[in-house]
Amino acid sequence: MISDKVKDILNEQINKEFYSAYLYLAMSAFFDDKGLYGFANWTKVQAKEEVDHGMIIFDYMVDRDTKIQLKQIDVPENDFKSPVQVFEKILEHERYVTSSIEAIANLSLDECDLATRNFINWYLKEQVEEEKNATDIITKLKLFGDEKASLYLLNEELAKREYHKHEYD
Ligand code: OFO
């Protein structure tokens, strides 16, 4: 059985995942407005993956017969300046999400909830990838972003990202 503390932190995490989807969608709209369709695509695909992350926790809680309490989703930032600034915000946000996931891992251990501790491993792995993706794009933007041709090529590269439903494995 899931303790009240673990239940509360998982409910909060569902909210954070849906907030993440909102934030990425706001970024996608910014890029779309600037005509950077590849960047808009990349962030929109990420928004869909964030919804999957929230749904995986939702389904886990249903499986464990735990009460789900959906909370209000905050309004995301909508005012961005440049591609590199957006990706720096993405990295900062993903680091924050990583610390939330680590808090779930630690709490589930404190509560002797080994099933949740095991469940959350998938997210720990996922966060390594998400921080790396943001870091890699920041590196490219800082190296070449001032040159229009390079920005064009990166935009084309990011246009290729496809959405595949994120399954828990
Ligand atoms: Fe961007 O990460 Fe979800 O968990």
Image: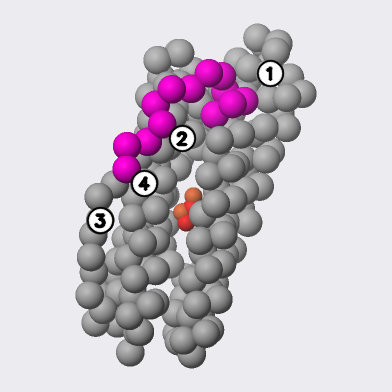
For the residues labelled 2 and 1, the Cα–Cα distance comes to 18 Å
Residue 79: in magenta span: yes
Which residue in the structure is indicated by mark 4? 19
Q: Which residues are magenta?
A: 74-86
Q: Is residue 87 above or below residue 163?
A: above
Q: Amino acid at mark 1?
A: Gly
Q: Amino acid at mark 3?
A: Lys
Residue at image x 43%, y 67%?
168
x then y, percent, for residue 54: 35, 58
Nearer the observer, 63 or 110: 110
Which residue in the structure is indicated by mark 3? 71
- Element marked by disc 4: helix
Q: Earlier in the sequence, mark 4 or mark 3?
A: 4
Q: Amino acid at mark 4?
A: Tyr
Which residue in the structure is indicated by mark 2? 43
| Pair 4/2: label in front | 4
Residue at image x 46%, y 76%?
119
| Pair 2/3: label in front | 3
Q: Is residue 12 above or below residue 20?
A: below
| Pair 4/3: label in front | 3
